[in-house]
Amino acid sequence: MSDDPALAAIRLLAIDIDGTLLTPDHRVLPEVRRAFADGRQAGLALVLASARSPAALRHILEDLGHAGSCICFSGGWIGRIDPVAATAVAAETVTIPLPAARAIAEAALAAGLVPSWHTERQWAVPGLSPAIEREIRVTRQTPCVTADFAAAGQPNKILLVGPRESLLDLRDRLQAAHGGEFDAVFSHADYLEILPKGVDKARAVLALAARDGLGRDAIAAVGDAPNDLGMIREAGYGVAMGNAAEEVRQAARWVTASNTEAGVARLIDRILAARRG
């Protein structure tokens, strides 16, 4: 387990949530909960790095018994979340300019898609749909149903859920018209995340590490989806889940077990074993 000497240098581990930390039915396995406790005790910085909002991470952190630095909206929000104190304090937040955000939402509606407009404190949707109802169950958040997205403020992200071909077509049209104001990345095959220009998990992880004086060699990152590729490539030790997309597996230095087999716990155990020598 501790055969790679590079693991002994790891001081910060960035962990994706859906498809990585959580099982397919969105549970934290007991082995993962135990590994988090071991990592904290050993002084390993465990950073959740997700496309979710701060509010959608609180129940996961509570289940883990964990409070600390988190990356939300794929890097559009960086801060500290404490589920016991019910606080989420931003250190950095980046948003999509309102004119571009409005145009994106209007184009999505015209294409028959239901846009999810996410700010630090609010989730706005124009109406309910099967995809929105699924998000409610998964994130345990309740959206505000409104036609006036702008009232929620400039979004940290806009989530579009639908058939991949429809999303690809809309992404290409939007990038041609507004590409200088946003980036777009798939977090799942049918989930397109519209983010502020230049925002991604890799930049956020490197920024957090730099605040603690850590270089790339001290960073590990693990994920399963295309929106994890940046941090897996930029970290000193990039890891793919056993259930990861093939392009993610190819980019990784090591492939751990799947999310149904506590792959995150195996990675934490391997890091701690290497640090003990």
Image: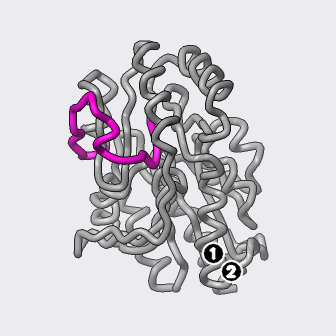
Q: Looking at numbered disc 2 in the image, what kind of residue is underneath it? A: Leu
From the top left corner, tell me how far across and down residue 27 is, in percent. Answer: 34, 49
For marks 1 and 2, the one nearer the N-term is 1
| Residue in the picture at 67% in, 71% down | 219
Q: Looking at numbered disc 1 in the image, what kind of residue is underneath it? A: Ala
- Picture colour scheme: one colour
Q: Quadrant of residue 147?
A: top left
In the rendered view, does 61 fall on the left or right side of 92? left
In the rendered view, does 247 fall on the left or right side of 245? right
**Callout 2: SS:** loop
Q: What stretch is highlighted in magenta?
A: 139-158
Q: Residues within 10 Å of mark 2 (few under 14, many from 20)?
A: some
Tag on residue 261?
Answer: none
Which residue is outermost to the front? 99
Residue 259's place in the image compared with 130, above or below, is below
From the top left corner, tell me how far across and down residue 48 is, in percent. Answer: 48, 62
Residue denoted by label 1: 209
Residue 160's place in the image compared with 20, above or below, is above
From the top left corner, tell me how far across and down residue 80 is, in percent. Answer: 41, 72
Q: Residues within 10 Å of mark 1 (few under 14, many from 20)?
A: some
| Residue in the picture at 43% in, 23% down | 106
Residue 78's place in the image compared with 10, above or below, is above
Choose between 9 and 255: the one closer to the eye.
Answer: 9
| Residue in the picture at 64% in, 36% down | 245
Residue denoted by label 2: 214
| Residue in the picture at 35% in, 47% down | 153
From the image, which quarter does the N terminus lie in? Answer: bottom right
Residue 244 seen from this side:
no
In the rendered view, does 69 fall on the left or right side of 233? left
Evaluate if marks 1 and 2 touch, with contact meaning CB atoms under 8 Å apart: yes
